[in-house]
Each structure stands twice: as structure tokens, then as C-alpha cells.
């Protein structure tokens, strides 16, 4: 019974190490370039007047998305 428990613990530890290694869980984040940082900043400033305005609904998001598209950037 103890041998099975040790085997299960060892298997779980090995699985955890494998899943947290850089090869297994690669980040899909976009690289931050100067152009992307500038676009994010500009688009946030454009959308800011519509933040927390219930009358405008989702306009903040629409303005931000359109601005990022104008800069050829993924939102």
C-alpha cells in the first residue's frame, strides 16, 4: 500500500514539473514593441472619456478596438 502511495506522489510531482516547464506551457503573449506600447497608450486615452459612463454602454471598448485596428495592432 505504501509503495502505491509513493508511486502516485512521484507521478504527480513529475507531472507538475513537466507542466510548469517552459517547453510545455509556452506563453502566447504578443511581444511588446515601442509601436504597440504607443498604440495601447493612445487608444486608452481615446477611450477614456467613455469609461464608467452607463449611457454609452460598450462604446469605450468599441473605440479602443477601432483605434487598435487603425494602428494594425491586436487588441
Image (spheres, rainbow, N blue to C red):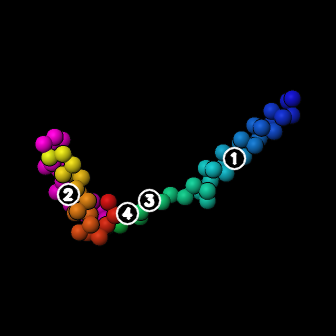
Residue 74 locus on image (x, y percent): 34, 64
User: Residue 5: percent from the left, percent from the top?
Assistant: 80, 33
Image: 57 above or below 5: below
- Kindly identify which numbered label has been placed on residue 63: 2
- In the rendered image, the vertical position of residue 20 relative to residue 5, given as above or below: below
Task: Give the CA separation, mark 1 to mark 4.
Answer: 31 Å
Q: CA distance from mark 1 to mark 3?
A: 24 Å
At 55% from the left and 58% from the top, the residue drawn is 26
Residue at 62 percent across and 53 percent down: it is: 21
Tell me, yes or no, whether the two marked residues, 1 and 3, touch with CB atoms within 8 Å: no
Figure quadrant of residue 23: bottom right
**Residue named by callout 1:** 15
> In this picture, which residue range is highlighted in magenta?
36-55
User: From the viewer's perspective, is the residue at label 3 or at label 2 nearer?
Assistant: 2
Q: Nearer the viewer, residue 22 or 71?
A: 71
Q: Is residue 51 left or right of residue 29?
A: left
Quarter of the picture holding the N terminus: top right
Looking at the rendered structure, the secondary structure element under dot 4 is: loop
Residue that numbered label 4 is attached to = 32
* Label 2 vs label 4, nearer the camera: 2
Circle 3 sits on which residue? 29
Q: Nearer the viewer, residue 57 or 46?
A: 57
Amino acid at each position: 500500500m505504501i509503495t502505491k502511495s509513493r508511486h502516485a506522489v512521484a507521478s504527480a510531482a513529475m507531472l507538475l514539473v513537466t507542466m510548469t516547464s517552459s517547453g510545455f506551457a509556452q506563453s502566447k503573449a504578443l511581444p511588446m514593441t515601442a509601436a504597440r506600447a504607443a498604440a495601447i497608450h493612445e487608444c486608452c486615452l481615446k477611450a477614456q472619456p467613455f469609461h464608467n459612463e452607463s449611457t454609452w454602454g460598450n462604446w469605450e471598448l468599441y473605440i479602443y478596438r477601432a483605434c487598435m485596428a487603425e494602428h494594425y495592432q491586436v487588441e
